[in-house]
Image: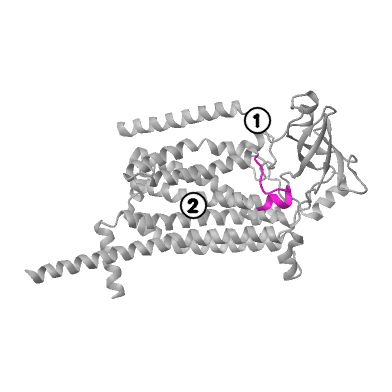
Amino acid sequence: MIHPLRKQRMQWICLILISASVATALIAYMLRQNANFFYTPSQIVIGQAPLGVSLRAGGEVVVGSLKRAQQSLAIEFLVSDGSHSVKVKYEGILPDLFSEGQSTVVTGKIDDQNTLHAVQVLAKHDENYTPPEIAEMYENQGI
Amino acid sequence: MIRSFFSLKWLYRLSSPKLFYSISGKAIPWLLSVSVALLTLGLFWGLLVAPPDARQGDSFRIIYIHVPSSFLALAGYYFMAVAGAVGLVWRTKLSFWFMKSAASIGASMTFLALFTGAIWGRPSWGTYWVWDARVTSMLILLFLYLGVMAMIRAFDNKEYGQKNGAILALVGTVNVPIIYKSVDWWHTLHQPATLKLTSESTIHIDMLQPLLVMILGFYLFYALTICLFLRAEILYHEQATSWVKDLCARRQEKSG
Amino acid sequence: MRMQFASLYELIDMDGHGVFVWTAVSVSLLIFLILVLLPILSHSRILRNIELAMETEARSLRNADVKK
């Protein structure tokens, strides 16, 4: 049988673990929105995102929406989460992985036309890793 | 036989510093050669033979260090916390020294995970650093490790420091599932997990094989460094005991 | 097994990503080296200290015997 003193110490350890978990769960609950790295286009369209302050929006760059200026680095494109989309204007260097049909996270301010004036554009990639030949094969099959 | 296994007497015997010192001394050459062989094979395979990623090209190869070091950073935290809890309950000296060793090694692994993540972030995301939930909770893990390391050393009374370190390690365990689930619970820039326990991994088999070799290599390397750190710790704390003096006397006889 | 890189230059360059990959690899190797060397060095330092202390003790014991 386990020694009563050790049993008591084990109970203390359980108490430490439980109270730390409860405290963390409460903090996480409090931060549940603030801990998000970006707003979805739907949240912005519905009006859940604040206007005129710097924030991030994330989603997929809509295929065919990317327009580049002739003379400068200025671009504009639509970011969508499937149900809503937000127009983004940006002037600057894009990450290598930025392209239409891929995910992105942009930082900037939203004006009253729901256009986001971005100061930074990041590329978000997914958790899939595929050799080029296999990816090509999928593409040809239309998957 | 089975009963004696479950009575944990064998574990209790292994917690004798003298016995652990001699067993680990024999294990070190094996751990060193196998882990170096696996890491060499994994790096060669992953960096030179595995195909590049269709989207990320060759920058994806950082995965072969980033993922194994992240695994050990998280698993190592549990090893450290469990050792601390065992020390608190059974007051075995060896478990506190294990905790101290695991704290240093875990902090190194966490740093490595953060560093390789930053290096990988530049070509893939377009930035070295973001304050998203995954990256930030990983940074918190580094500070928890450093906090445990500092706590163990902060008191003149060593036993007091060890107990406080163990309590901090236990409190910090709540961060580990948060790191793991952060990519599912919140919108993050970091992608969700590639290797999954319950469903199929989302990485091609040709890229997966070297990754598994690297993960195994990292685990064995972790065991190796635990043995190395723990032996130094044992020798330091047990220097007044007769078995250490016998050991030194025998060494002196051998060297003449 | 087929190599992905035709030449050493291609291997180092990695389509422009070589800087990132090789930095990550070399820093990792450095940390691994430190993780192995640090405990080995402190282990041998502690051993030396113990042996020094034993020698001093033995010498003082001998001196005490001589005085008697």
Picture residue at 25% right of the left edge, 56% below the top: B241
Where residue B83 sits, quadrant-wise, is top left
Picture residue at 62% right of the left edge, 55% below the top: B65
**Which region of the structure is painted magenta?**
B119-131
Q: Which amino acid does label 1 sit on?
A: Asn
Q: How crowded is mark 1: few (under 14 residues within 10 Å), some or many (20 or more)?
A: few
Picture residue at 75% right of the left edge, 53% below the top: B53
Picture residue at 63% right of the left edge, 57% below the top: C24
The residue that disc 2 covers is B105
| Lateral position of residue A115 relative to residue B86, left or right | right
Q: Is residue B120 magenta?
A: yes
Where residue A55 sits, quadrant-wise, is top right
| Lateral position of residue B158 relative to residue A101, left or right | left
Image position, residue A103 (x, y; %): 78, 41
| Lateral position of residue A21 relative to residue B129, left or right | left
Q: Distance between the residues labelled 1 and 2?
A: 32 Å
Image position, residue A69 (x, y; %): 91, 45
Is residue B54 or residue B142 the one in the foreground? Answer: B142
Is residue B57 or residue A143 the one in the foreground? Answer: B57
Image position, residue A84 (x, y; %): 83, 29
Q: What residue type is labelled 2?
A: Ile
Which residue, as the protein is rendered here, is positioned at the far bottom?
Answer: B256
Q: Does the magenta stretch include residue B138?
A: no
State which mark lies toward you, 1 or 2. Answer: 1
Does the rendering let one see residue C20? yes
As drawn, C23 above or below B8: below
